[in-house]
Amino acid sequence: MRKLLIMVLALCGIGQVTTAQELYVNTEPASNMPANSLGIRLSNKFFKMEHDGTTGMRFEPEVMWGISKKLMVHAIGYASNMMQSSIRMEGGSVYAKYRFLSLDQQHAHFRMAAYVKGSVIDNPYFPTTEATKKPYHNTDLDLEGATSGVAGGIVATQLLHKLALSTTLGYSRYMNNVKDNIPEGFPKNSVNYSLSAGYLVLPVRYKNFNQTNLNLYVELLGKTNTDVAGRGSYLDIAPAVQFIFNSTTRLDLSYRTQLAGDMPRNSFNSMLVRIEHNIFNIKK
């Protein structure tokens, strides 16, 4: 019986090794969370606002559900003080990802998935604060609190033992907010792209579920507005560190800054702090 238990733990440890470094902080991998599992996540983002020099904060509570091994969905809420003087609810979004290709080997695999996202946002396009120090100029819209809209794309992820590489190519269509229309000069379409790398640093060798995982990430995040109005591009870099405790709870820390670009933006630098807890086998 003891030998059987050790064997099960070893096999589960191998499973951890092949997935831990794919839990990217700023993007989603092609892999899904386990079927019949539930994740609860709270992300806090901090931005230096260009127009008034203040620190904007955005809070994103999120619930994730692994419907099957191929399909998962997220429900996300947004609240911030980025466009007004106090923190208020901005709206929400729904994200779904379907994994349609899996090529598995020992300590390696290649996966591809398609995703869709829809957001409904109740936010002004221009800040209502009175502390503006210079003209507000921004054409960097997103579906994370800035504007309503829909998005879709493809994700491909390659695992090579302790290193995981992933790339995303997507399209976003921006729509009017609940109480405000997109102003002239703002974009309505964009192409989004990313390249992410994750490396499992600790543990060097798995012994049990209670060992703490340490993962290091670096992600390149880009966008190009395709409309004549609001045209522009940028490329950001976002290094991150991640801790996973007891195989169920994770802590993410990431700093994001622009490498190159010509797009006017709300902010060129941001910090992310996230805590997440996962519950497995929610239906027995």
Image (cartoon, grey):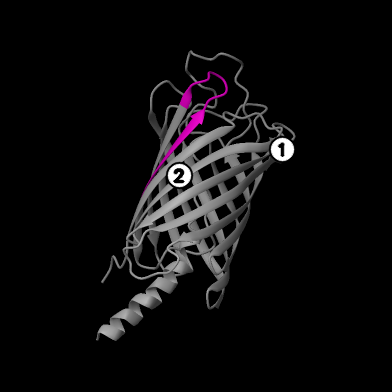
Q: Where is residue 84 shown, x and y percent of the image?
A: 44, 22
Q: Which residue is situated farthest in the front direction here?
A: 204
According to the image, label 2 marks what residue?
253
Range covered by the magenta-colored residues = 41-55
Determine the secondary structure under disc 2. strand
The reply to whether callout 1 and callout 2 are in contact (CB within 8 Å) is no
The quadrant in which the N terminus is found is bottom left
Q: The disc labelled 1 sits on which kind of residue?
A: Asp
- Residue located 46% across and 62% down the image: 20
> Is residue 206 or residue 117 the one in the foreground?
206
The quadrant in which the C terminus is found is bottom left
> Is residue 81 or residue 221 the one in the foreground?
221
- Residue located 57% across and 44% down the image: 238
According to the image, label 1 marks what residue?
227
In the image, residue 278 sits, relative to residue 191, either above or below, namely below
Is 46 in the magenta?
yes
Q: Where is residue 152 shown, x and y percent of the image?
A: 58, 53
Closer to the eye: label 1 or 2: 2
Q: The disc labelled 2 sits on which kind of residue?
A: Leu
Left or right: 122 with respect to 139?
left
